[in-house]
Amino acid sequence: MFAEGKTQQKLQWKKDANVLEYKVHVQNTQTGEKKIFTTEANFVNVTLAPGKYRYKIVAYDFLGREGSSSDWLTFEVVKAAVPKVVPPETAAISADEKTLVLPIEATDVSKDSKVYIVNDETGKRIPGTLIAEGAAGAGAATAGAAGAAGSALDSLSKSETGKASRAQFNEVSEGKWHVEVENPSGLKSSSSAIAIKNPAKEKRIAEEKRIAEEARKAEEARKAEEKRLAEEARKEEERRIAEEMKKAEEARKAEEERIAEEKRVAEEKRIAEEKRIEEENRVAEEKRVAEEKRIEEENRLIEEQKKAEEEARIAEEKRLKEEEEALEKERLAAEKKLEKDAKKNKKAKAEEEKKLAKERKEKEKQEKLALQKEQQELEKQLEEEKKEAQEQEKLLKEEEELAKKEQEEEEKKNKAEERKAWREAHPPMFNLSGGIGFSFAPGGNGIMQFSDKDAVPVVNASFAFLPFRNKKRSYEFGFEVSAFYEQLKSTNDYYSVILHTVEPSLNLCYRHRISSKTVKWQMKGGAGFAIISKNVEFTSDKENIVQPDSGQYGYFFADGGLSLVITPGNVFSMELGSDVIYIFADELNAPVVKPYASVGVRF
């Protein structure tokens, strides 16, 4: 117990419900003075001078009879002193950066006194150990200092006070602190502010700064060296690129010159072929004109021959007529002669007339047959000549058509070679395609939870731009803009939900040839923005049901895909693959797989 002036002390014990009152006997063991205090409570307040005492408690029941009593118990009343502490203005933390041995002047402290160091800014309190004046190991470690403190302060009795010259604390940081010393009586005092420094930390920080500065300089030197090497590499790369561009330009010029030479040669061939065909046409035309003239001359000769034959026929008819007239005259003369000789021989006259008439008819018949035969032969010759002229004209036309066909084939061949050279110099870089597929989510999670089906059909469209490739075109690299559209529907007894989703995306695209020039595998990855249009309708037929409004939502998503691209020519393409998208939304956060097949055009 502690006493300062008229301070009261309190003796307290466990209360007994069967006790009416207590009598407390207090005796000074040094002077023998004895005092008795009576109380009905289970405590008593006393005012005692400093010294050693003993006490016992005697209980009395409700009849006033003395009951049980306790044994004599000793205690000591000591003087309650106010400690005083005078700290230094500054102090340094030890080399281990954990221990602070603070030189102070602390008076009126006992072995049970407590010491704290308190941070002025944060209010943090760290308990410490007081080290008595004259104790060994003033600058020792914690264990030595604590031992010194025990050897000095522990020897004091509870009623004795002493002095402490140092206080030891652990885990103290730099800053403004003050020291608080508190005696067992509860009386305490605080010191002025102390600037705590950490020389080891400052040295370590200085060393770290030095090392950091050296590292910074080394880093700057390294960066300068890297920059120099990068600049040299850049210049070398620029020189290499310039050389490659020069070579490429020379190759391009050589290729252009080759193509121009081929075009010139092809043009010369075409002109020569046109001249040849023109010459052949001219010769054929001259032949045709000559043939027409020949046929015309032959026709003229035939006409002249016919005219001459007609004139000969007329002359022959005239001659025959004259002969007939002569024969008639002869006949008349003969008749006259016969008339004269009628009497002589009528029979001879009749036979002679008959013979003459028969000879005349036979001669006329032979002349007509000869004339008809000659006319038929002439007509047959004219027909053969006409037929030969037609065949010659037909042959000329066939030659003209053949020459024209050869010219067209040569022009087609030249154009095909030009197109092939142009395609080789300008390979297709764009690909526009569209197709169909289906969409599903493993486990039916994500957006597929709004569908009654495990898989729904989708349509897709894409536009790819692949400008980067090697000379052999074994790989291509570029960009792709694509989009999927799908419709999800979920229905129950109360409402139906229909989602229309459009998922445009921008991807990086890489294609690599597998075995032939027509088959490549493709890998792509990128991000997009899903636009979801929601339409919810209640299916209940109850009246006054408010139908919900439709809504639109947008979410970002990441996507990637693998596919097989088949290009049978320079125009058409086919693609078989599968994309996976992941929508960044709490209720839709599950991957969705979209296998598809598409066809397209390249240009």
Image (spheres, helix red, strand yellow):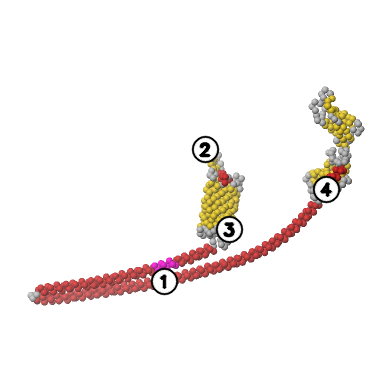
Tell me the element at label 2.
loop
For marks 3 and 2, the one nearer the N-term is: 3
Would residue 338 appear left or right of 224 to someone viewing this image? left
| Residue type of the residue flagged with mark 2 | Asp
Give whichever of 76, 573 is nearer the camera.
76
Q: Quadrant of the N terminus?
A: top right
Q: Which residues are magenta?
A: 398-407
Work out whether 199 lies above or below 415: above
Would residue 549 appear left or right of 213 to someone viewing this image? left
Magenta segment: does it hold 403? yes
Viewer-side label of 1, 4: 4
The disc placed on residue 151 is: none
Q: Quadrant of residue 373?
A: bottom left
Circle 2: is it few (<14), some (14-19), or many (20+) Cα within 10 Å?
few
Residue 461 in view here: no
For marks 1 and 2, the one nearer the N-term is: 1
Work out whether 573 lies above or below 70: below
For marks 3 and 4, the one nearer the N-term is: 4
